[in-house]
C-alpha cells in the first residue's frame, strides 16, 4: 500500500465504482486515538447519494470503508457492493 499525503487529496474528484460523479473531496475525519480514517467529506451538488443526505454545509459524509482506490480521483463503492472481506482492503 502506498502512502497518500493529505495535501494530495485536496480538491480531488470523488466518483463511485458504478460511474456516478459524487463531488469534490472537502475534508477527512480521523480517529485521533488510532489514526484510522473514519469519514470522507464530499462537497456535492447532489442532495443525497447511497441514502446519505447532504448536511447543512452542502457536504455528504461517507464512511471511509467505502473507499476503493485513490489515484487521480477518489473512487468509492456504493455500500451495497461491499462484502465483509472487502471492507478491510483499501487500494491506495
Image: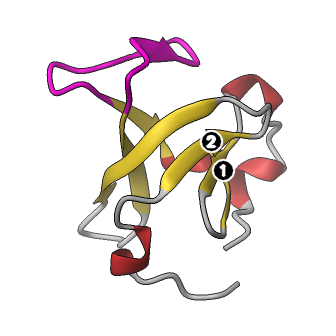
Question: In the image, what residue occupies the spot 23% across and 21% down?
Answer: 55
For the C terminus, the image quarter is bottom right
On residue 67, the disc is none
| 6 with respect to 91 (left or right) | left
Is 15 placed above or below 13 here?
Answer: above
Residue density around tag 2, few if under 14, some if 14–19, many if 20 or more, within 10 Å: some
The image quadrant of residue 42 is top left
Please identify the dominant SS of the magenta region: loop
Is 31 placed above or below 42 here?
Answer: below
Question: In the image, what residue occupies the spot 84% across and 49% down?
Answer: 85
Q: State the CA–CA distance, disc 1 to disc 2.
A: 5 Å
Residue density around tag 1, few if under 14, some if 14–19, many if 20 or more, within 10 Å: many
Instruction: Give how far across and how far down residue 30 sits, in percent.
Output: 31, 61
Question: In the image, what residue occupies the spot 80% across and 50% down?
Answer: 86
The image quadrant of residue 37 is bottom left
Q: Is residue 46 magenta?
A: yes
Instruction: Give how far across and how far down residue 56 sits, in percent.
Output: 15, 19
Q: Is residue 21 magenta?
A: no
Span shown in magenta: 44-59
Question: Which is more N-terminal, label 2 or label 1?
Answer: 2
Instruction: Answer whether labels 1 and 2 touch (C-beta < 8 Å).
Output: yes
Element type at marker 1? strand
Quickly name the residue at label 2: 15
Q: Nearer the viewer, residue 69 or 80?
A: 69
Is 55 placed above or below 65 here?
Answer: above
Instruction: Give how far across and how far down residue 29 sits, in percent.
Output: 29, 55
Instruction: Give how far across and how far down residue 25 sits, in percent.
Output: 39, 51
Quickly name the residue at label 1: 75
Amino acid at each position: 500500500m502506498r502512502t497518500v499525503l493529505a495535501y494530495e487529496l485536496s480538491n480531488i474528484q470523488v466518483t463511485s465504482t458504478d460511474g456516478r460523479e459524487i463531488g469534490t473531496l472537502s475534508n477527512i475525519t480521523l480517529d485521533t486515538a488510532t489514526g484510522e480514517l473514519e469519514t470522507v467529506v464530499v462537497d456535492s451538488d447532489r442532495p443525497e447519494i447511497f441514502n446519505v443526505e447532504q448536511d447543512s454545509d452542502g457536504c455528504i459524509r461517507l464512511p471511509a470503508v467505502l473507499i476503493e482506490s485513490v489515484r487521480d480521483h477518489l473512487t468509492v463503492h456504493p455500500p451495497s457492493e461491499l462484502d465483509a472481506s472487502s471492507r478491510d482492503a483499501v487500494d491506495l
